[in-house]
Image (tube, helix red, strand yellow):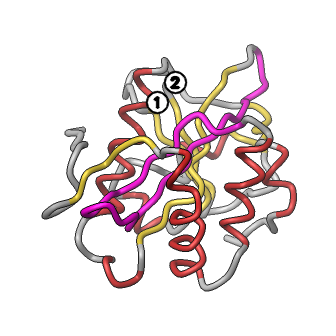
Amino acid sequence: MTRRSGNGGEGIQIRAEAQGDRKAVDAMLRAAFGGDGESRLVERLRKGDDLIVSLVADSAGDVVGHIALSRALVSGDSDLEIAWLAPLAVRPDRQGEGIGSSLVYAGMDVCLGLGLTHAVVVGDPDYYGRFGFSAEEARGLASRFQGSALQLIDMTHAAPPLSGRLSEPDAFMELEPQAG
């Protein structure tokens, strides 16, 4: 898979979230999701020290997108730490510009650099399938988020299929499992 990181479109820089970005990230998440659930999730992930990647899409100093990846664990014959992608958001007036895609690719690049070989997401299979996430890949995972929305990617394209119990960060405990 070809990775594209760096720019998400004209004048967009993908970079690590800075302390000073937090209010803008919170406002952008509220606008993108029409509520405060995802902004509360990100805050809980920060407080629980579960975030391993937090990137923003910056357009001339304005935060127009955000991706968070946190620690998850697959327990089976041997334990494996993987990344859990949630949430991904782009400000509504900037959607459709490739910003979300650039954030996903950049986030996966950072995870690979940290030695994480897999990532999981609970989301739209049509959207996340374009990056290589697959419900079929996740079929060996036992999770309260079971179904077609639970998707896994082997970012190395070389690891054996994963199976075992998928444990999400404690911050996710307030989330309702999606049907699928």
The disc labelled 1 sits on which kind of residue? Cys
For the record, the magenta segment spans: 50-77
Q: Residue at x 58, y 64 (%)?
A: 23
The disc at residue 116 is 2
Q: Is residue 105 above or below residue 146?
A: above
Q: Residue at x 27, y 76 (%)?
A: 96
Q: Outermost residue toward the top? A: 78
Task: Find residue 94 and report its image quarter.
Answer: bottom left
Pointer 1: what residue? 111
The disc labelled 2 sits on which kind of residue? Leu
Asked if the magenta segment contains residue 74, the reply would be yes
Label 1–label 2 contact, CB within 8 A: yes
Image coords of residue 72 (percent x, y): 70, 35
Front in this rendered view, residue 95 or 133: 95
Asked if the magenta segment contains residue 91, the reply would be no
Image coords of residue 73 (percent x, y): 73, 30
Q: Is residue 112 above or below residue 58?
A: above
Image coords of residue 33 (percent x, y): 58, 79
Q: Earlier in the sequence, mark 1 or mark 2?
A: 1
